[in-house]
Image: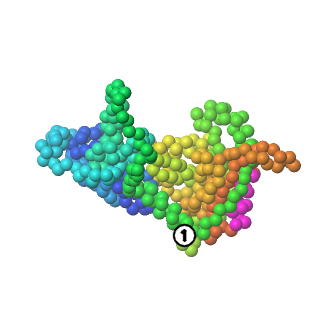
Amino acid sequence: MAIEIKAPAFPESVADGEIAAWHKQEGDSVARDELIVEIETDKVVMEVVAPADGIISKIHAAEGDTIESQALLATLETGAGAGAGKAAEAASSEPPEKAGAPAAEAPAAGEVPALGPAARQLVEEHKLDPSAIAGTGKGGRITKEDVLKHLADKPSARAPAPAPAAADPDAVVEVPSGPSSERVEKRVPMTRMRARIAERLLEATQQTAMLTTFNEVNMAPVMALRRKYKDQFEKTHNGTRLGFMGFFVKAACEALKRFPEVNASIDGNDVVYHGYQDIGVAVSTANGLVVPVLRDADFMSLADVEAAVSDFGVRARDNKLTIDDMTGGTFTVTNGGVFGSLLSTPILNPPQTGILGMHKIQERPMVADGEVVVLPVMYLALSYDHRLIDGKTAVQFLVAVKDLIEDPARILLQL
């Protein structure tokens, strides 16, 4: 029986996708739920798996092709009909000249071939030179399997290099007089995700009246609370670690209730006030920054927030985030401090009108009760759309977050 394998239904915010990498070819047998193909969209890399056991009898879209929602990707033969696929599998194992199939068009000399998302991640992780990898995809595109084969075939993985011959004492060795004159450049196309990120950031700077206000927060109370309860917290909540993000998400939720303009969005000439707090949390991946959303974050506990953020990080690294995970959001929190950022200006995530930036915690001399003391301090930044939010409101919102973090009991008591 023939089964049509189609692309997933894309939401309205995603117009189309690109075939990033085929993990199976015509004639290959597959098991139910086995990965067949990856589709790269503007937001995520989507995986399509086999709906049943069988053999891929026909592939209808090649790597690099742009496809729309529900487009036909492949035909799967199950049951008795899979016999024809086995013959195709045998034929595909022959050399192209013998089977009568044309060889894949290789990239021109000196040109870096295109990489699929999974292949790109492996190349960056192992610091490989893409031009040294033989690509078997369309137009010489490098697939994940090509990278794995290249790693397995590297001389260092098979056997140590032979020892050099004994040096001739009478030989003249020429030593370069200066640095190499070779100036290497490479040109690679932007991924769809990177191009979409660039487009949205440019829109945010050109189509909003974005300003940023700053403040500083004494992190000593939260750090003391964390030191005191982190072991008990992790044991009670099944291994969930107590970090700082949970405190800031909960503080942001409380501040958003007091200043609803910061939780609103602009739709044409209308202002949409949201009666809920869906908080986007910026997560860095090898392909760029993504912002999965904590739904109804105001009803989540600290443990719920920390567990969800940890899960987002793992799934983002493994390209397992879905479009639904990153759709919507009324406000965003981003933490550049994990990379060492001391101060920055976060860019809005339209149509949201506010984004909170966390930064590195650093000890500084501060005046407390008339005395100079050394305290762990973090700079906070709130970028906001001045078309909707006045400076006074923005400052008051950030002060509210600061007050809640400096007295974390108020978060739990909702004071």
Which corner quadrant of the image does residue 226 belong to?
Answer: top right
Q: Residue at x 56, y 53 (%)?
A: 280
Q: Is residue 249 visible?
A: no
Q: Is residue 227 visible?
A: yes
For the record, the magenta segment spans 391-404
Residue at the right extreme of this rendering: 370
Instruction: Judge left or right: residue 35 versus residue 272.
Output: left
Task: Tell me the crowding category of disc 1: few under 14, some 14 to 19, or many 20 or more residues within 10 angstroms, Cα based.
Answer: few
Residue at mark 1: 207
Which corner quadrant of the image does residue 54 belong to?
Answer: top left
Camera-nearest residue between 341 and 86 = 341
Indicate whether 72 appears above or below 164: below
| Secondary structure state at the residue bearing disc 1 | helix
Indicate whether 256 appears above or below 307: below
Camera-nearest residue between 6 and 38 = 38
Q: Residue at x 66, y 35 (%)?
A: 230
Colour approach in the figure: rainbow
The quadrant the N terminus occupies is: top left
Identified by mark 1, the residue type is Gln
| Magenta stretch: includes residue 148 | no
Which corner quadrant of the image does residue 210 belong to?
Answer: bottom right
Residue at the bottom extreme of this rendering: 269
Residue at the front extreme of this rendering: 170
| Magenta stretch: includes residue 394 | yes
Image coordinates for residue 235, horizontal then vertical, percent: 62, 31
Instruction: Judge left or right: residue 23 versus residue 196.
Output: left
Q: Residue at x 65, y 50 (%)?
A: 342
**Main secondary-structure element of the magenta-colored stretch:** helix
